[in-house]
C-alpha cells in the first residue's frame, strides 16, 4: 500500500520530438514498461518495472530513448543508503529472503586495479609479438613428480590427462536452464573455434552439444542433474562443483517455470518441477568423501579425463585447496566473491566469501610451501574482466581463468542484474522462446571469438613488453607485479612489492 | 692448460664488464684431492669462520683447510677471508640421513648460505674450483694466481651487474657441487623459475638469474636425472610450432618435457655456459637474443660471447660458428682425461 510505494529507480526518458511511434520499444521490453494505448494512440511508460537493461535504448531506431538513474529517493545518509532502506521495506512487506543476480556490486576493494604490470627497458629487451613467436598455450592437469624411464633409458612420456587451452581462459559454468539454449550454443561454438573450453554448469548437456565435447567441461553438482555415463565421457574434463563465489555454502534453485520440455530432458527431472541443488553434496561430508567422488568419476571415465574441483573463495581457502590437491583432483577452480550468478540470496552474495586475488595468492603460495603446486593446476574466476586481469592472475600464480560475466556481456548482457526474474531482454538468462530467439548463436559466437581474440592480442603485447615469450614463464612470476595503494599486509598476502620498491 | 690463457681472453672483453664482478671456474685443478669436495668459502670475520667451521666439523671430515693463495694488487680491495676446505661427509651422519653424498653436500652448502651470516660457500665440487671477486676479471685472475693452476676446462665471466649490487659472492661463476654457471643476460622468467625451484629445497638468496639457473641445472640433471640435451629442451624449449614439425616420437618427448617442466622455461636473453665434471654445455635462449660464438682447433673448443675473446687464445681456428638459439653445444673431455 501507500507505505510500500517507492519512487522507481530509473526514469525512462523519451524525446517526443524524435519518437516515430514505431512500437519497437513496446515489443522489446519484456518487463512491460512501454505500452501502446491503441485508443488514444499514445505510448505509456511504467518506469517502476524498468531494470535498465538498455534493450529499448539500443533498439529504438531514432535513438529517442534514454534511461537515467532517478535522482529521487529517500533521505540517504552514509549508514542508511537508498538500497539498504529499500531492502528493509521489501522484507517488511514480504517476509522473504531477498534474491539478486550477477556478481557482488558492493564497493569492496578490487585488487586487480591495485596491481601494476612490469615492462622491460634497456637491460632486457621487450619482444615484439608481431615479429616473434609469442606463446599462450597451456596444459592443465597433474604433472609427475619424477621422470620415469624405460629399460633403454627412454623417457616414458605418458602423462595424466591434461586439458589443453590455446589461451589461458575458459568460459565459466553457466547451466542450461539458468541461461538459454542459444547462449549455450554461442559459448560452445566459440570455445571450439578458440581452442578453449566452456562449461555446462550443473544442468546437464543438451544432446545437440555433444558434438562440442572436446571443448566442453561437464559439471557434476550437488543436484546431479543430467549426470550419466555418456555425459561424463562427453567432455574434455569433469568439474565437481563444491561451491560458487556468488553464494558460498548455498545450493541452487531453478524454478519449475523454467523447466520446460527440453530442460526437463537434459536435467532428467519432470517438466515443471523445481530443480533444487542442496547446499552440500550429500555424499561429501569430508575431504575423504571428496576423494571418493573424484576417483568414482575417474573410474567412470577410465582415467582419461582430468577432474576439476571447484570451490568458492572462503576464509580458509589455502588449507581447503591443499586438501583438494591431495584428494586426487587434477585441477582446482576457485571462484571469488565477485563471481556472477543467475540467482543468489542477496545477503549471501554481498557478504560471504573473499576476493579472488587474495585467495589465489594465498593458495598458490600454500601449495608451493607444501611442494605440491605442480600436482594440480589452478583456475580462478570471479571476476576476470579484461586481458589485464588475466595477466595479473597468471602472474600471481593461476594456470588459467574462468570468464563468465565478460562473456555474457559479449553476448549482449547489459548487467541489469535481474536474471532471477527470467525475463532477460537479451535472450540470455531466460527460457521464454520469444526472448531466447533474440540471441543468434552465430552472431553470439562471432562476438565471443572477437572478444577473446582481442584479449589474446593484448596478452601477447603485455607478455612481449615484459620480455616474456611464453605464458608459462609468467605463471607465478610475481616480480612482474607491483602493488599500488596497498598496505603491508595486503602486499604480504599478494606476495608483491609496492610500486617504487 | 693453466689459467693463463683464459685470463688473457678476458682482456678484450673489458668493455663488457664494469668492474663489479669477475670470476673463473677451473676443472681438474685439484688432482691430489680428487675424491674430496673442495669447499671455497668467503668469511666476513674470524668469528664467522669459527662458527661455520664448528658446524662443518659436526658433519664433515676435513682433510685439509687453508686460505686460498692470493696476490695483493691495487685493483682488488676489501677482500673477505677466503678459505678452502677439502672435505668428505662423515659416514655416520651420511648413513643416518639416508641420502647420497652429493645431496648431503648440497644441503650443507644451502644451510651455510642461508643460516650462517657472514659465511658464503662459493664453490663445492670435486676436483674443481671457483675463484671470484669484485673487480675486472683479468685482475681477479691475477689476484687468485690462476696461472699456477692447471686444469682441463676453464670458464670465465665479467659482470655488468644491473639488478644487484656488486658483491664478492654475487660474481659469476655461480656454483653448486660441480655445476657452475656463467651467464650473460637478464631473464624475464626469474620469479616463475625461482618460486618453482624453491619447492625442492633450494633457497635463492642472491636474487640473481645465475643462481636460479644453477639450481635448475642441478635439479634437472642430478635430481630428475635428465640428460644435458633434455635440460636444454626444458629451459630453452622449442616453440610449440617447432615441436609440431618434428617426428612423432620426438614430438611426444618434447611435448612431455615442456608440459612437465613448464615452470622451468627460461625466457629473456641469455647465453650460458654450464660447467660440470668432465665437460661443459653452452646454450643460448630460444630467440638467440644474446651473442655466442664457438671456435674449434684440434682437440680444443673455445666458447665466448665475442669472437675476439677466442682469437686471443687461438688466432688460427679450424672452425668458427654461432650456434642457433636453444641448440646446446656440449663438449666432453675424453674418457680418463680428467
Ligand atoms: S526494462 Fe529494458 S527494455 Fe524495458 S524500458 Fe527498461 S531499459 Fe527499456
Ligand atoms: S543476463 Fe540478461 S537479465 Fe541477466 S544481467 Fe544480463 S541482461 Fe540482465
Image: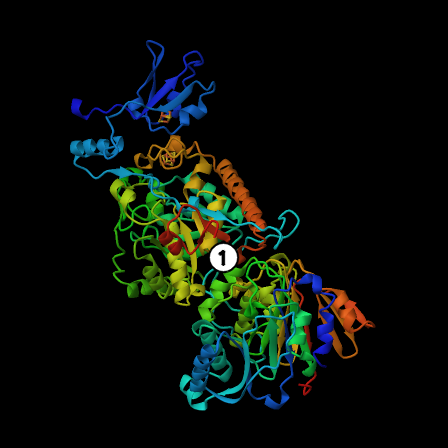
Q: What residue is at 34 percent from the left and 35 percent from the top?
A: A417
Image coords of residue B58 (percent x, y): 42, 86
Q: How many marks?
A: 1
Residue at the spot of label 1: A477
Q: Quadrant of the C terminus of chain B?
A: bottom right
Q: SS for tag 1?
A: loop
Colouring scheme applied when the structure was drawn:
rainbow
What chain letter is assigned to the residue under label 1? A
On screen, residue B146 versus residue A68, left or right, reads right
Image vertical order of residue A45 relative to residue A437, above or below: above
- B43 or B71: which is nearer to us? B71
**Quarter of the picture for ligand 1?**
top left
Q: Quadrant of residue B83?
A: bottom right
- A80 or A17: which is nearer to us? A80
- A272 or A112: which is nearer to us? A112
Near mark 1 (Cα within 10 A), the count class, few <14, some 14-19 or many ≥20, is many
Q: Quadrant of the N terminus of chain B?
A: bottom right
In the image, farthest residue toward the right: B316
On screen, residue B203 versus residue B324, left or right, reads left
Image coords of residue A264 (percent x, y): 32, 44
Q: What residue is at 63 percent from the left and 56 percent from the top?
A: B241
Image vertical order of residue B300 relative to residue A97, above or below: below
Image coords of residue A321 (percent x, y): 35, 60
- Examine the rendering and report whether any part of residue A70 can be seen: yes
Amino acid at each position: 500500500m501507500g507505505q510500500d510505494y517507492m519512487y522507481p529507480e530509473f526514469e525512462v526518458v523519451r524525446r517526443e520530438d524524435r519518437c516515430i511511434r514505431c512500437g519497437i520499444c513496446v515489443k522489446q521490453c519484456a518487463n512491460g514498461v512501454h505500452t501502446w494505448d491503441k485508443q488514444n494512440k499514445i505510448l505509456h511508460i511504467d518506469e517502476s518495472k524498468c531494470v535498465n537493461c538498455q534493450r529499448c535504448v539500443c533498439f529504438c531506431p531514432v535513438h529517442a530513448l534514454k534511461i537515467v538513474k532517478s535522482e529521487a529517493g529517500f533521505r540517504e545518509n552514509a549508514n542508511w543508503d537508498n538500497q539498504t532502506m529499500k531492502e528493509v521495506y521489501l522484507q517488511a512487506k514480504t517476509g522473504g529472503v531477498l534474491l539478486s543476480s550477477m556478481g557482488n556490486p558492493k564497493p569492496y576493494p578490487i585488487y586487480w586495479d591495485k596491481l601494476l604490470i612490469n615492462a622491460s627497458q634497456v637491460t632486457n629487451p621487450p619482444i615484439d609479438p608481431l615479429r616473434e613467436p609469442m606463446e599462450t598455450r597451456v596444459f592443465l592437469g597433474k604433472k609427475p613428480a619424477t621422470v620415469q624411464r624405460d629399460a633403454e633409458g627412454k623417457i616414458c612420456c605418458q602423462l595424466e590427462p591434461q586439458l589443453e587451452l590455446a589461451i589461458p581462459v575458459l568460459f565459466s559454468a553457466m547451466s542450461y536452464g539458468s541461461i538459454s539454449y542459444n547462449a549455450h550454443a554461442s559459448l560452445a561454438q566459440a570455445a571450439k573455434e578458440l581452442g578453449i573450453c566452456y562449461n555446462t554448469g550443473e544442468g546437464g548437456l543438451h544432446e545437440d552439444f555433444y558434438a562440442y565435447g572436446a571443448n566442453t567441461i561437464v559439471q557434476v553438482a550437488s543436484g546431479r542433474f543430467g549426470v550419466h555415463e555418456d555425459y561424463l565421457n562427453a567432455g574434455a574434463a569433469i568439474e565437481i562443483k563444491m561451491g560458487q563465489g556468488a553464494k558460498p555454502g548455498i545450493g541452487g534453485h531453478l524454478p519449475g517455470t523454467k523447466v520446460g520440455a527440453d530442460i526437463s530432458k537434459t536435467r532428467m527431472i519432470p517438466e515443471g518441477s523445481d530443480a533444487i541443488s542442496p547446499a552440500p553434496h550429500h555424499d561429501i561430508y569430508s575431504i575423504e568423501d571428496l576423494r571418493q567422488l573424484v576417483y568414482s568419476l575417474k573410474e567412470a571415465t577410465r582415467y582419461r579425463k582430468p577432474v576439476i574441483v571447484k570451490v568458492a573463495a572462503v576464509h580458509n581457502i589455502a588449507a581447503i585447496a591443499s586438501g583438494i590437491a591431495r584428494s586426487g583432483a587434477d585441477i582446482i577452480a576457485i571462484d571469488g566473491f565477485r563471481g556472477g550468478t543467475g540467482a543468489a540470496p542477496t545477503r549471501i552474495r554481498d557478504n560471504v566469501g573473499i576476493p579472488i586475488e587474495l585467495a589465489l595468492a594465498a593458495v598458490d603460495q600454500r601449495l608451493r610451501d607444501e611442494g605440491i603446486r605442480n600436482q594440480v593446476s589452478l583456475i580462478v574466476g570471479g571476476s576476470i574482466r579484461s586481458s589485464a586481469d588475466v595477466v595479473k592472475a597468471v602472474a600471481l600464480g593461476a594456470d588459467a581463468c574462468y570468464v563468465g560475466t565478460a562473456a555474457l556481456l559479449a553476448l549482449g548482457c547489459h548487467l541489469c542484474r535481474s536474471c532471477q526474474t527470467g525475463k532477460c531482454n537479451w535472450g540470455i538468462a531466460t527460457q521464454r522462446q520469444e526472448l531466447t530467439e533474440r540471441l543468434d548463436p552465430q552472431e553470439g559466437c562471432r562476438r565471443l571469438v572477437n572478444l577473446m581474440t582481442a584479449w589474446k592480442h593484448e596478452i601477447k603485447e603485455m607478455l612481449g613488453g615484459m620480455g616474456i615469450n611464453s605464458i608459462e614463464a609468467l605463471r607465478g612470476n610475481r616480480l612482474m607485479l607491483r602493488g599500488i595503494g596497498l598496505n603491508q599486509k595486503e602486499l604480504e598476502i599478494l606476495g608483491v612489492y609496492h610500486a617504487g620498491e | 692448460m693453466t689459467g693463463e690463457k683464459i685470463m688473457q681472453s678476458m682482456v678484450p672483453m673489458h668493455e663488457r664488464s664494469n668492474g663489479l664482478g669477475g670470476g673463473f671456474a677451473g676443472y681438474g685443478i685439484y688432482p691430489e684431492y680428487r675424491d674430496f669436495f673442495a669447499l671455497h668459502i668467503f668469511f666476513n670475520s674470524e668469528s664467522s669462520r669459527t662458527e661455520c667451521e664448528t658446524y662443518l666439523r659436526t658433519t664433515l671430515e676435513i682433510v685439509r683447510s687453508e686460505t686460498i693463495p692470493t696476490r695483493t694488487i691495487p685493483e682488488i680491495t676489501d677482500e673477505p677471508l677466503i678459505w678452502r676446505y677439502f672435505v668428505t661427509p662423515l659416514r655416520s651422519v651420511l648413513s643416518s640421513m639416508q641420502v647420497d653424498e652429493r645431496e648431503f653436500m648440497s644441503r650443507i652448502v644451502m644451510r651455510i648460505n642461508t643460516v650462517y651470516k657472514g659465511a658464503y660457500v662459493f664453490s663445492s665440487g670435486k676436483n674443481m674450483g671457483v675463484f671470484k671477486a669484485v673487480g675486472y676479471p683479468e685482475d681477479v685472475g691475477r689476484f687468485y694466481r690462476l696461472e699456477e693452476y692447471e686444469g682441463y676446462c676453464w670458464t670465465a665471466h665479467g659482470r655488468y651487474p644491473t639488478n644487484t649490487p656488486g658483491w664478492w659472492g654475487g660474481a659469476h661463476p655461480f656454483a653448486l657441487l660441480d655445476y657452475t654457471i656463467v651467464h650473460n643476460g637478464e631473464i624475464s622468467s626469474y620469479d616463475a623459475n625461482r618460486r618453482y625451484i624453491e619447492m625442492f629445497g633450494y633457497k635463492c638468496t642472491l636474487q640473481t638469474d645465475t643462481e636460479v639457473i644453477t639450481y635448475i641445472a642441478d635439479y634437472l640433471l642430478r635430481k630428475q636425472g635428465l640428460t644435458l640435451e633434455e635440460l636444454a629442451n626444458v629451459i630453452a624449449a622449442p616453440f610449440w610450432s617447432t615441436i609440431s614439425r618434428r617426428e612423432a616420437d620426438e614430438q611426444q618427448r618434447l611435448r612431455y618435457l615442456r608440459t612437465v617442466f613448464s615452470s622451468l622455461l627460461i625466457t629473456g636473453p641469455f647465453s650460458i655456459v654450464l660447467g660440470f665434471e668432465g665437460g661443459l654445455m653452452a646454450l643460448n635462449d630460444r630467440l638467440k637474443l644474446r651473442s655466442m660464438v664457438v671456435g674449434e682447433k684440434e682437440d680444443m673448443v673455445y666458447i665466448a660471447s665475442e669472437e675476439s675473446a677466442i682469437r686471443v687464445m687461438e688466432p688460427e681456428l679450424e672452425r668458427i660458428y654461432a650456434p642457433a638459439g636453444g641448440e646446446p653445444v656440449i663438449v666432453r673431455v675424453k674418457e680418463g682425461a680428467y
